Image (cartoon, rainbow, N blue to C red):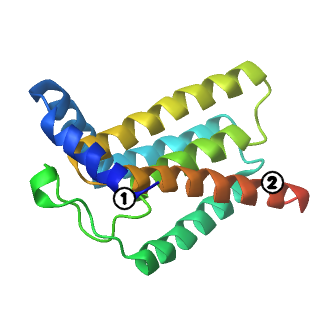
Amino acid sequence: MHRSVDIEVARWCADHRNGTVTDVFRFLEDVGESTAFFVVAGIVAVILILLLRLRTGLARILISMAVTSTATGWLKEWIDRPRPPYDLAITHLSGPAMPSSHAILTSTIVTALVLAPWWTSQRLRVAVGVLGAAGCLLSGVAMIYLGGHWLTDVLVGWALGTGITGGMMLLLKRTRLT
């Protein structure tokens, strides 16, 4: 996409913000970036893994997510793209903008969950995928709306999170890593 698309989308968001949507997106941003959220999510994940005996494929998921995080972290530093200017943003994140870490994280988690080997119901797998995609979309729209990211930062983040994690999950499946 051409950079002018990013500017136009950022300007449109800045011109069309309203109190309720802004409050909801700021709340989601605060929750999603809090240490408490990650601690609670980690504890819930461990409990679910132990209670539901979801150890099959766990190494595959963890390795895939670690590779995605490492690769995209290096890429973010290499691209070193500035964030939207302060006059278009109401949130001010630090570090380079592209690719969006929020988009990478959400799409990585959803991809790993959908491709996990423990599903016995295709309908449940699809439901998790649809709900996860909706969560990814909400997170990405929030970051663009708040001015923390350009549109293309989020699109590239989704593509990388899904592509690298999905590719690693399939590669590790072929090597029979459980």
Q: Is residue 148 above or below residue 139?
A: below
Quadrant where the image shows the C terminus: bottom right
Q: Which residue is mark 2?
A: 170
Q: Which mark is residue 48?
A: none
Pointer 2 local density, CA inside 10 Å: few below 14, some 14–19, many at least 20: some
- Front residue of 78/88: it is 88
- Front residue of 97/126: it is 97
Give the amino acid type for the residue marked by disc 2 in the picture.
Leu
Q: Circles 1 and 2: CB distance less than 8 Å?
A: no
In the figure, residue 171 lies in which quadrant? bottom right
- Front residue of 106/4: it is 4
Quick check: 171 left or right of 85? right
Pointer 1 local density, CA inside 10 Å: few below 14, some 14–19, many at least 20: few
Q: Is residue 46 visible?
A: no
Residue 129: percent from left, percent from top = 62, 31
Quick check: 74 left or right of 171? left
Under circle 1, the secondary element is helix
Q: Which mark is residue 3?
A: 1
Residue 105: percent from left, percent from top = 48, 53
Label 1 to label 2, Cα distance in Å?
Answer: 34 Å
Q: Nearer the viewer, mark 1 or mark 2?
A: 1
Q: Is residue 62 visible?
A: yes
Residue 1: percent from left, percent from top = 47, 54
Q: Residue furthest top?
A: 123
Residue at coordinates 23% horizontally, 61% vertically from top-left?
Answer: 93
Q: Is residue 130 above or below residue 34?
A: above
Residue at coordinates 62% horizontally, 22% vertically from top-left?
Answer: 127
Under circle 2, the secondary element is helix
